[in-house]
Image (tube, rainbow, N blue to C red):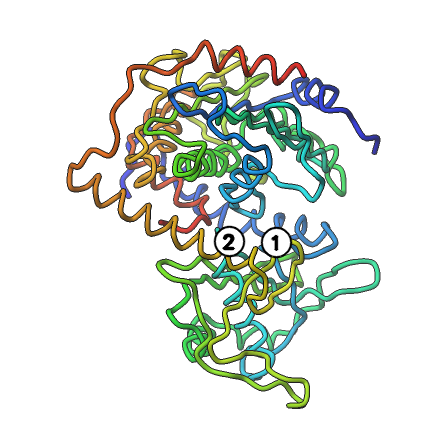
Amino acid sequence: MEQLTDSELARAIRERGFLTISISPAKYLENRVSRLTRIFSIVQSASVENQGWDFPHINHEDPRREDDWVGQATDWRMHREIWRMAKSGQFMFLGGITNDWLDRAVPPQAPANSVFYLWEICARLLQVYEFAARLSLTDAGDDQMSIEWELGNVGGRTLEVGPTRGRFYTAQPLSSNEFKYPSRHRSPDSLAERSTLVSDPRLYSAEALVALFDQFGIDIEIEQARSIQGQFDSISSN
Amino acid sequence: LIFKPILSFYEYWSLRIVWALLLDSAELAELISIGHELPGLEFKSWGSATDARFSGKIVRAMLGMANRSDGGRIVIGVEQTPTGFVLQDPQVELLQTWTHDNLSDRLAGYADPSVRFKLEYVPTDASQAAVLITVHEFDDVPILCKKELLADPASDGFILKRGGCYVRPRKKPETSELATFEDMRAILDLATQKQLRRYVAQAEAAGLTLGLAQDALDGDLYRTERERIWNS
């Protein structure tokens, strides 16, 4: 398989369903983390493994180092993702929805790009908020952290549990092609208090899951979202 | 668990059953197809839980997994070939020896403090099965080995050493005794972070404020930075 540049890979990822994530301390400090080597070690130690895949994925290649950021790109089978972290502490991620790339699996399968698998987003959200909690306790953290994510190219998809079966018959297809969480940028909704984030990151991922279910016309409560998360979770409770 | 009527009985059980029975097998096939082990993943060929030395090697791997962030998984029933890893034919009599109770008893003799784990049988297809052991990272302090286990023959040294701290080095997917300062720092950082998180959680529960609240996110500055970095 040919090796793509980062920008080619980013373009390819955005051609199908994708997820972008931005995590940052509330206050902008240009040189919050002064050394690039320190940035990579922060991301590496905060990376969260769940169900066999880590977020963000740390591969064995040397990270790309620029003046004020470090990053890695992974393009392996259906796992296509890029992450970067700036000296300001801002972490950014762009990744493909894996079931959209099943034609790159071994053996290849038909991409499932008309559905949205709950297991994938659920496992990923758990990782994202746990990662943010871990980051908040490092040099790249602050008393308040902003966590924003967005799904793209998801319009018309139905909600299913996983690849084999388990359709939510009461769910309505997504009407919008994108879904931003929280919906209003720069609003206090995107800010998480470090103390709450660290003590209960699953609260935030459960809130995000409630908002996602709402997009499919399914009304669930936080405690129900927490129970659903429990089914998809191999992360140790802290 | 009580869902509102809109989340039907079928949907609830779909969630539970599909994940428990079907996804693991697909996931296992994918993991095996990687062709090599990972820091959080170890493959073992079939052996009996009643074989002290074989189960000692499993315990050793479990101690290493428990001392890494997010723990790890051990799959029994996979053998290494010149071209990679493949599932072995099922050996029912060996598989039946792998129960949570058996492994708990074995582990309790060596691990201090105790290790949390889950043991499952993964149905790989109609005729094959493997044992999947999911090990959680330690709760408070790193796990040490409290008893030794000699290899066979004894001239090969120890499978487990008393006082040994087993780790999974980042650079090599194997279980080894703590030997480098990088691994020492990683395990100390993990323990420190856990203590810190516990302290913050207790402070939060007690209503203590740690740090001052800020007014708003510096969103424009971050957005400008984000666009510049993505475009470079």
The picture quadrant where one finds residue A44 is: top right
Vertical order, A103 against B123 (above or below): above
Which amino acid does the dot numbered 1 rest on?
Arg
Residue found at x 26% / y 43%: B201
Residue found at x 26% / y 23%: B213
Residue depth check, mark 1 versus mark 2: number of the one nearer the observer? 2
Vertical order, B177 against A10 (above or below): below
Q: Is residue B144 left or right of residue A104?
A: left
Coordinates of residue B110 in the picture (x, y in percent): 45, 77
Residue found at x 63% / y 25%: A113
Q: Report the residue marked by disc 1.
A: B170
Q: Which image quadrant: the N terminus of chain B?
A: top left
In this rendered view, identify the residue nearer to me: A182 or B92: A182
Coordinates of residue B31 in the picture (x, y in percent): 66, 51
Q: Report the residue marked by disc 2.
A: B186
Coordinates of residue B102 in the picture (x, y in percent): 46, 77
In this rendered view, identify the residue nearer to me: A165 or B40: B40
In this rendered view, identify the residue nearer to me: A150 or B206: B206
Looking at the image, do the residues carrying marks 1 and 2 touch, with CB atoms under 8 Å apart?
Answer: yes
Within 10 Å of disc 1 (Cα), the crowding (few <14, some 14-19, many 20+) is some
Given the image, what chain letter belongs to the residue carrying mark 2?
Answer: B
The picture quadrant where one finds residue A56 is: top right
Which amino acid does the dot numbered 2 rest on?
Ala
Coordinates of residue A171 in the picture (x, y in percent): 43, 24
Chain-order first, disc 1 or disc 2: 1
Q: Which image quadrant: the C terminus of chain B?
A: top right
